[in-house]
Image (tube, helix red, strand yellow):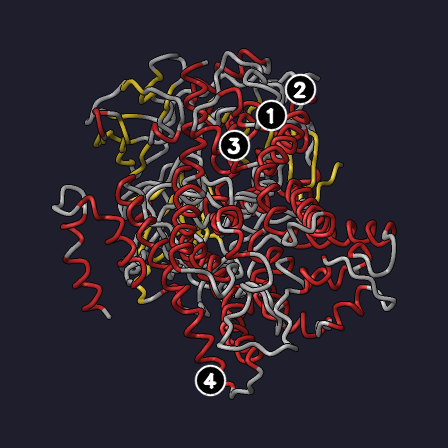
Amino acid sequence: MKKFKLRRGYDIKLPGETVRTIEPFTLPNRIAFKPTDFIGMKPRLLIEPGDKVKIGTPLACDKNNEKIKIVSHVNGEVTEIVRGDRRVIQMIVINVDTDQHEKEPEFAINDLNKNSIIDTLLESGLFFNFVQRPFNKMANPADTPRDIFISAMDTAPLAAESSLILQGNESSFQKGLDVLSHLTSGKVRLSFKPEETAFSEFKNCELYNFSGPHPTGNVGVHIHHIAPIRNAHDIVWTCSVQSVIHIGRLYETGILNQEILVKVAGSAVDRRYYHRTVVGAQVSHLVKDLNENSRIISGNVLTGKQIESDGFVGYHDNLVTVIPETTEPEFLGWLNPGFAKPSWWKTFASALLFPNKVRTVDTNMAGGHRALVINDIYEEVVPMSILPSHLIKSILVEDIEEMEALGIYEIAEEDLALCEYICPSKTEFQQIIRQGLDLIEKEG
Amino acid sequence: MKSLYNFIQKFSSLFGKGGKLESLYPIYEMGEGFLFVLPQKTKTGAHIRDSIDMKRFMITAYIAMVPAFFFGIFNAGYQHFLSLGQSATILTILLKGLLIVLPIYLIVLVVGGVWEVLFAVLRKHEINEGFLISSFLIPLIVPPTIPFWQLIAATTFGIVIGKEIFGGVGMNIFNPALVARAFLFFSFPRSISGNSVWTVFGEKTIDTYTAATPLAVVSDTVTNSGGIIQILADKGYTWFNMFLGTIPGSIGETSTLAILLGLLLLLITKTASWRIVISVIAGGFAMTTILNLIAPDSSHIFALPFHYHFVMGGFAFGTAFMATDPVSSSSTRQGKYFYGFLIGAVAILVRTVNPAYPEGMMLAILLMNTFAPLIDHFVVQKNKKRRLKYASQ
């Protein structure tokens, strides 16, 4: 087993860690699918509000490839289609029936060759479990990925522990790995922390150990160190631990069961547990007794999406973070020695004297936008051979050749999220990376 | 403070989009930002952000220069009374120094501020706190006798040509303060070189007072059996008083001690790049060692050891506050080693080989500012080549 020790990066220490207890499974009253979770999908609805749906009923398909479908994994009734600007579909909301016993016909699971697996995954909606690199978007069923990467370690602030997600699902996970191995021309590559030995037993995949601060757990970092993406056509797929379990479960039983583990964390919520529920659960089902003036994030504080208190957990997310919103202006803040300011920098007394103390962080921008002034610090939080500020500048001037040469195919938004956090000029790194990737897709 | 905040917020619509005074928004933003860290919520991307901002960053650099500034005030007064041969109380010295230095600082601050605000309003960008640094640096690197009109011209040149025409802070190629100094150096050489400009003289000067800077002393071709250090000592310059800074020179550059205090702050707060600082010193040391080896005799300037070079002229000041300027220095981590090393080496080379330019540090930094993009180019090229290599596998 190959071991990687990465030095660069930064662990933001946030208060609001969750106790390691798992609540028993409960079914939410409502779930929702958000087509925006699947980057690159242009949804066309196959149902209307009021329609009864069952497990396995397709809800929407992609306009460019009708085989790619969003499929209901519960029995219930479509109550609402939420649309955003230009009538783009934001959410398909389903009222979940209390009785889930009436199952749809089982999926074909005995044929383990690439084409039939892809067909089954498309039919069950689980094809969305794959995310493609480069471009960090939904995978294309026509591709044969060079490798499939699974990160069984999430180093983001307050992230759910992969070993807890795995707990009790070991056989499904192994089954999932077996299925995945038929889809790639190369290997299924699984990376995990050295201390999480539960992952070292799995077969039918290559095992890797990574250790180091965030973003060491990002799958993009693993790809970079194990077998980097060479160009726009060098396609690999990535898959989360939870997603592998879902695929494995389907192939074990023939039944679509998207039960997941969701961690609720963050300083603005008092009741913090791991919950067993289903994909797309309404967040009010999980987060109760919300403090006033708080922000609910589906995902982690660096890359997650803000959701309302009646919103829904994202398709790929195992974490709901609740942090306080910023409210109070601070008088003459630049003069404050800063004994309570959380910072990667050392210009505050807090970071200088007690760098390991956990401090409450709110949603304050803590400054205005400025031109990029300090250019080499970003490398210190990116454990890859990437020059973030040079890459960002090449995107801003829309120089595609330069972006390619500087390695835009190797990264996704999440890999530079820490740059965004530490930037004193408050540069929107993630948004700029997405612009660059979209530009290349459009032009290419 | 809440009421003051609410009071200011009342005006936000006036300066905001569609407001009557929208064009003056940068001024409003500056005032508001000066008084309050705003409770501005993150909208896109990461939901939490580091507490650092450009203001904090620049203020830290500003504070780092304060010891050198205060010592400059003291020394301007001290040299004045020393040249008169009078003894004076510390208070009178400071008062005299304040009278000399404060007008210089205020002029630069006002002139620099006016240009910065003017360009910010015209080009509709925020007022960048970088001008605080430039306008603090310029007074520290001019002689205390600088004529005000020349100072105004130099500040204007430094800010406008050195910075604003490139698009403001973050876009400039050269360090604006050094551009201002170079402007003075080449346009008004008599105001910034020679032996008579470093001290504000009184009505009479006593014979024993050495007005020449240590660098001018070592550049003179005098031989002395005691070697170069003895030549300095004969003029009253020991290593220790040069380290302390009680010598004639530009306002802020004489005290290596005060500069090192500031440098310490810059390094522990990560505000300056330690890579640059270490490599400037290494470059200076390497070049001095070579020169020491080839020195024709012990009283030649080549024979001057590095720890003397470090405390003389602008070497320490340039290392701490000029070479480390994040904008005009090399923008890659590896590039910073080359950039710093060459500054150190070139500075020593210029000041020893060409007696016409005893102040090599300024020229070395400006020269390397020019080459910083080239150095970066090679580093970036290396990064790209590595990628190309596995791309072709």
- Report the chain holding disc 2: A
Number of the front mark, 4 or 1: 4
Image x and y of residue A371, in percent: 41, 42
Q: Name the kind of residue labelled 1 in the image.
A: Ile
Q: Residue under circle 1?
A: A148
Q: Residue under circle 3?
A: A391
In front: A108, or A41?
A41
- Report the chain holding disc 1: A
Image x and y of residue A405, in percent: 58, 24
User: Which quadrant holds residue B160?
Assistant: top left
Query: In what element is the residue under mark 2?
Result: loop
The reply to whether label 4 and label 1 mark residues of one chain is no
Image x and y of residue A9, in percent: 59, 47
For this view, does A172 lie left or right of residue B297?
left
- Report the chain holding disc 3: A
- The structure residue drawn at horizontal position 65% and vertical position 57%, both measured from the top left corner, is B315
- The structure residue drawn at horizontal position 73% and vertical position 40%, both measured from the top left corner, is A3
Q: Residue under circle 4?
A: B92
Q: Earlier in the sequence, mark 2 or mark 3?
A: 2
Q: Residue under circle 2?
A: A186
Q: Compared with residue A297, is residue A21 higher up or lower down, i.e. above or below?
A: below
Q: Earlier in the sequence, mark 1 or mark 2?
A: 1
| Mark 1 and mark 2: Cα distance apart in space | 8 Å
Number of the front mark, 2 or 3: 3
Q: Considering the image in quadrants, where does the N terminus of chain B appear?
A: bottom left
| Mark 1 and mark 3: Cα distance apart in space | 26 Å
Q: Name the kind of residue labelled 2 in the image.
A: Gly
